[in-house]
Amino acid sequence: MLARRTHITLCSLLLMIIAWVPAHVHGQSIGERVAASSPGDIVTIEAGVYTEAPIIIQHPLTLIGETGAIIRGAGDHELLVVDADSVTIQGFQFERVDKTFLEDRAALRIAGASHCRILDNTFDDVFFGIYMAKAHACAIEGNTLSTTIENETSGGNAIHSWYSTDLFIQNNTIDGFRDGIYLEFTDDSVVQNNVSTENHRYGLHFMFSDRCAYRNNRFVDNRAGVAVMYADGILMHDNEFTRAWGTSAYGLLLKEIRDGELIGNRFSENTTAVFMEATDRMQIEHNQFANNGWALRIMANAIDNTFTANDFVGNTFDVATNSRSAPSSFAGNYWDRYAGYDLDADGVGDVPFRPVTLFSLIAERHESALFLYRSVLVDVLNAAERIMPAMTPVDLVDAEPLMAPTIDPDQGTPISQTVLR
Amino acid sequence: MKSSSSTLRIIQFQFQDALSSRWLLVHTLIYLLIAEGLLMSSGFTDKALVSLVNVVLLLVPLVALLFGVIHQYTNRDYTIWMLTQPLKRPNLFSGLYLGLTVPMVLSFSVGITLPFLWHGGLAAGQAVQLITLLGLGAALTFSGVGVAASLAIRFADRVRGIGLALVIWLVYALLFDGLILMGISVFGNWPIEKALIGAMLLNPIDLSRLILLQTFDAAAMLGYTGAVFSRFFGSGMGMIIASVTLLLWVAFPVWLASRLFRKQDF
């Protein structure tokens, strides 16, 4: 009996040693090796689980993790801080940073550094993933970030930036945070080819960030795909916004923004594809709106936006507005509800199309009217209103509605057309 | 003769009569053409199902009311002759009533379902939706024919009976919703969602529409309003209230018609 117990004790001791050894191959933690390096060194970290106090990098350095190099926190602290310019962090797996309401605790924090490169890392079960404050010209590429949170208030953001400029965020995969990518007071930055899914608030979120661009990203199953607020000159090209579905869910939420472009994007199965409030002088072209509840909800304070060559297919409401006038212009879009004709066969309908139905106007004013959604009465009222507009904005009209879609509804690729005008 | 078997015999006669006359075939064909047309034009069964909801909610009550009234006026002599037979009136009534409604429900179900079958069947979720659709169509038929029977028994004048059937259909399919819409625009600034659910229970067509919307996941897009009725119809209690109310909408007209039938001096 005693012998057996000794045996077990020995075995577990041995196991502990085995588990402890890889973390200290050279008898040193990452922190010690970083401290021992000179500026400009390349430090390679072998596979193993490293559990140690926050690693702080204070001179230019390239820190590379070999496959299986895991930096695991105890939960109550951040894991790595970049506090110098020209630092590269590549190939690590960051694990376990618990939530807190006292600080923005992040797995990796970049504090006032420039020209950093965060490449091909994995973040799992973290509160904030990559946190940048006053960073400049940093590249965040090829990282995979995932976590599980219960709700919007109990989570952090995957990639978070505050007061930064010229960031380049590309090829990252993000799942399950509060905001996938959050840029606040962050100007002149590019976000492209990322996939941001199942975030509890926004897939991508701009606040007070000017002249940024995001393109070729996919936003799926987020509360809202992208929110752009208080930002000027944002370019939004070729993104995919899918299944922002639920009460007050939006594919793209635009609020207090000006002079941007929304071109070549695809919106499908969102409760509201695009919501615009105090949004001015936007150029909205070649987007596809398919199978959404509302394709566009435009508040009366959104002015001088132009909608051209967009496709509206299978939406419950194409355009809803609370305005009696039409402060934005529509021309040359395809509407699947259009029932007009094209006698001269130039591809453009001869009768104008009014995308705002009476019911959408009533529903905008009194939400409870949605109780009558799909009621026969509603169809009758809409038909009557279309013939003799009395309540819907008379000027909100597409005078040149297209007869055929410009984008293939199944493939999402542009259909080449010879429009004889 | 035992009473239940006499009811069954009458239903059997009615069935044979329905099969030999052409109305049942036409009835089936109408729904078959509508379902086939929707599937052909949309080519996408999910969309076709949603469109079918509108058709069913509009057409089924109209057919039940109008055809129910006309059928009973044309068969008045037959009914009177049957009354001379040694039969209890309640048995005769249930025989005549079921002999009309059951073939109608069956032919409606066949007409709607067949096109879906030869267009490659349904996904699992869609099957539930189709069954709900058929169930609600059946309830609306039972209810409508009950109302129609009451009208036909109460009013000997057919113009009056048919006219009233049309008015009733118009009220429930259109005017009721108009009143609701007026109510919403007057009281829209108050929290009237719960009152609206109550109001919807007063109209079997609206009630069916909301139950169907619930199965089509459309509720999520309807914002706060959608959340209110999701919570109601999504809960067990809400579904029980909705079902019981719908059953009352069947039971009351049938009870009324059978009572009138028993007391009527033909």
Image (cartoon, rainbow, N blue to C red):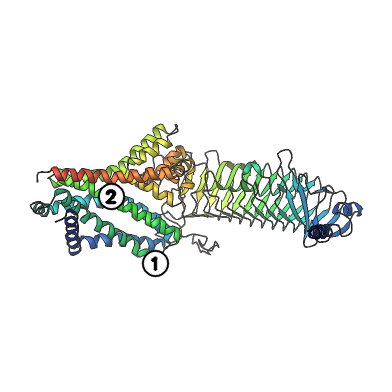
Check disc 1 and report the residue beneath it: B119
Residue B39, horizontal then vertical, whole percent = 38, 62
Spatial CA distance of label 1 from label 2 is 27 Å
Residue B81, horizontal then vertical, whole percent = 8, 54
Residue A84, horizontal then vertical, whole percent = 85, 48
Instruction: Report whether A376 appears left or right of A45.
Output: left
Which residue is more in the foreground, A114 or B100?
B100
At x 51%, y 60%, the residue is A406
The tag on residue B61 is: 2
At x 42%, y 42%, the residue is B237
Work out whether residue A339 can be spotted. Answer: no
Q: Is residue A419 above or below residue A207?
A: below
Quarter of the image where one finds residue B253: top left
At x 37%, y 34%, the residue is B183
Instruction: Pick the quarter of the image with the N terminus of chain A.
Output: bottom right
Instruction: Report whether A24 appears left or right of B197.
Output: right
